[in-house]
Image (cartoon, rainbow, N blue to C red):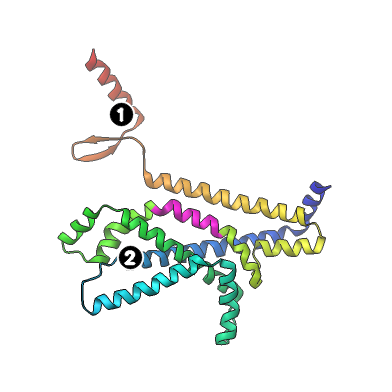
Amino acid sequence: MSLEWIIKIVSENGPMFLRGAGITLVIAIVGTIIGSIIGLLIGVIRTIPIPERGIKKIFLKIINAILFAYIEFFRGTPMIVQAMVIYYGSALAFGYDMDRFYAAIFIVSINTGAYMSEIVRGGIVSIDKGQFEAAQAIGMNHFQTMFTIIIPQVIRNILPATGNEFVINIKDTSVLNVISVSELYFQTKSIAGNNFRYFESFFVACIIYFVMTFTVTRILRLIERKLDGPDNYILMGNQMQVETAEDKLVREKNSDGNRV
């Protein structure tokens, strides 16, 4: 029976499943964090105003061309191909034998950075231009404006997209089995190869992937709600205060009395 085999596989290979899930989570978390930092830096650099002439214009044009090539290459090629090229190519071209685990983090990071840079750029462009003009009016340069005023707003705006990228990375780590990274898919393939019960083994892996992605999604939703703050506010003088349930009840009673 399949159910009996599922129970047997979990009981006999539980540590392997947990080890694979742990490596998957570590790669996804670290890769998403580093990729988000890369995306933030690229997004800020690509939004630097280009002057009409001078050396600065040439320098920014070259930098933007390099960043554009990086973004288009890593967004336009599959991660599985990138893993093969980077891991095996570094050994053939430079004679450098990369550690598989660190190679996996590097691959996920630069792949995520390419996607996050466009997400960040879109978040920056969505901010009202009046805020940039106000910052320039008080003497702020581009980087001061970005990291003091714009980026805090952008981080909140792109949080759902960042969470989505994190969930994608959890699933996409499965392609790293081509360079023999011992993540969840690799461990499941080894387990299935030992017991020849492919359906039951990968069904367990499917449940583990679902639990990880579902948990991450719920946590990110809670963080979004925390950043949004309470739903009800009332204006009192020049200060914004949270309207409690008692305040709302008193306000409704007063308004009913005024209507009478």
Residue located 54% across and 57% down the image? 168
Quadrant the C terminus occupies:
top left
Residue 58 spot, x, y in % from top left = 28, 78
Q: Is residue 21 magenta?
A: no
Residue 131 spot, x, y in % from top left = 23, 54
- Determine which residue is flagged by label 1: 247
Identity, as a three-letter code, of the amino acid under mark 1 = Asp
Left-right relation of 62 to 71: left
Residue 152 spot, x, y in % from top left = 33, 56
| C-alpha span from label 1 to label 2 | 43 Å
Left-right relation of 29 to 147: right
- Residue projecting furthest to the top: 260
Residue located 53% across and 51% down the image? 216
Identity, as a three-letter code, of the amino acid under mark 2 = Val
The disc label shown at residue 44, or none:
2
Query: Which picture quadrant has residue 144?
Result: bottom left
SS at mark 1? helix
Asked whether the beta carbons under mark 1 and mark 2 sit within 8 Å of each other, the answer is no
The disc label shown at residue 87, or none:
none
Please say whether residue 32 is visible from this viewpoint: yes
- Residue projecting furthest to the right: 1
Labels in figure, total: 2
Q: Earlier in the sequence, mark 1 or mark 2?
A: 2
Residue 236 spot, x, y in % from top left = 21, 35
Residue located 30% across and 28% down the image? 247
Q: Which residues are magenta?
A: 158-169
